[in-house]
Image: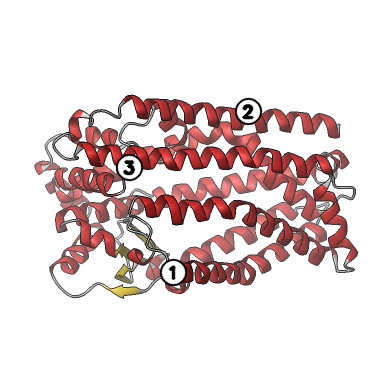
Amino acid sequence: MANGFLFIFALFYFAEHAVGLWLTSLNLRYLQLHAQSVPSYFQDKISLPDYQKSIRYIRDKTHLGIVSSLAEIPIFWGMLLSGFFGLVDLWARSLGLSPVLSGLVFLSVMGVLSYLLALPFRLFSTFVIEKRYGFNRTTLRTWLLDTLKGLLLTMGIGGPLLIAVLWLMNRYMSGFWWIYAWGVLALFQFSVMALFPVLIVPLFNKLTPLPEGNLRERIEALACKIGFQMSGIFTMDGSKRSLHSNAFFAGIGRFRRIVLFDTLVGGLNEPQLLAVLAHEMGHNVKKHVRASLVVGLGSSLAGLYVLSQLLKSPWFYSAFGFPVPSSHAALFIFAKASGAFTFFLEPVFSMLSRKHEYEADRFAADTLGDEQPMIESLVKLSKDNLSNLTPHPLYSFFYYSHPTPMERIQALERLPHLERGARDADQHWSSPNRGN
């Protein structure tokens, strides 16, 4: 049975990599096919040199991803077939610790090893590719500090969480440990969502309250109009690490904050910036955040249930070279195998995400009574971030969580005239309970 499980896993594993490589090659060829002329819509908005620069940027990032993916295959299978995972497990057990702490040691070693194997590709991406195209602003000192802070956060937050899950698995092995563990994970997720903007983000970036002025007043009026609760509006020194721009809101209830990258504030005019923020607020008003959370928690619960059915099967462990069944070995195998067994579901989640993006775009257009600021911001951000304007349709269908810039622009241009819709929206969103 162990060999049968390993064989099935291998089929899914190599299918995932084969599909990924095929779609990536399609995307590269499609990109090159359109390299000599700017897509018609963008011809008066993006110059040919800037467009071809975006193609080179995407191509370089894609090639690095291919090398990383291909390098992973022999390393992972060499470890698996040589019994490396089982040997590390036996070493962790030999330390004489409790089952929970032995599991923590094993999973920590695996986590560090995984991080080190991926490190050269991350460094090359940041300090070579991102620098080559003018995005990287991260210094070695900043990178080292970020790494240290990330490690301490992982130890201080992830360590206790992992200990709690392992304890529950060991304590209630024959019962409903998977429900208890899911409850702990859900509580952890809600806690992180609430504390992320007030405790975690400031560890890495400086948040500055947006100064009084016209922009702040317009943002506050926009939030009031749609019933978006927040604790403040802040700018973040994103340019300290990268010239890529973004905006987001984070937190729950009174902890929620709007955060604007300084690169975004400097790159967009006020109407465009308001459109981007209305889009982000739209995700909240349209319950997209809640829907994504429900889907994520539902997936976690289903996964933990499947794992609970495999815990007592010796073949599940021996297939990955573990001589002794254990909770931490089960978690490790499940983490390694689940992606391969579920990769074909990725388009489903991508489609749901793209649907949400279309709805948030329309919400922004309806709220402002004009689709042009949203369209202009999409063009500007696509140009500044060197986005792929011509991805292969199959590639974007499978992997893209956002519609392509052209798809979003076309959807906005198909909207009916917004003057009447804006007046209706004013009445519809006047309820103080909207967005809660």
Task: Answer with the quarter of the image where residue 403 lies.
Answer: top left
The reply to whether residue 263 is in sight is yes
Q: Nearer the viewer, residue 208 or 194?
A: 208
Mark 1 / mark 2, whichever is N-terminal: 2
Between the C-alphas of marks 1 and 3, the distance is 26 Å
Taking the image as shown, residue 401 lies to the left or right of residue 372, namely right
Q: Which of the image's four quarters has the N terminus?
A: top right
Q: Secondary structure at mark 1?
A: helix
- Specify the color scheme: secondary structure
Q: Position of residue 380 (x, y in %)?
A: 22, 47
Q: Nearer the viewer, residue 259 or 18?
A: 18
Specify the amino acid type for callout 2.
Ala
Q: Secondary structure at mark 2?
A: helix
Q: Are marks 1 and 2 in contact (CB under 8 Å)?
A: no
Q: Position of residue 139 (x, y in %)?
A: 43, 67
Q: Mark 1 highlights which residue?
A: 201
Residue at horizontal 10%, vertical 42%? 420
Taking the image as shown, residue 153 lies to the left or right of residue 256, namely right
Between the C-alphas of marks 2 and 3, the distance is 28 Å
Q: Secondary structure at mark 3?
A: loop
Mark 1 / mark 3, whichever is N-terminal: 1
Q: Is residue 296 above or below residue 264?
A: above
Q: Position of residue 60 (x, y in %)?
A: 43, 41
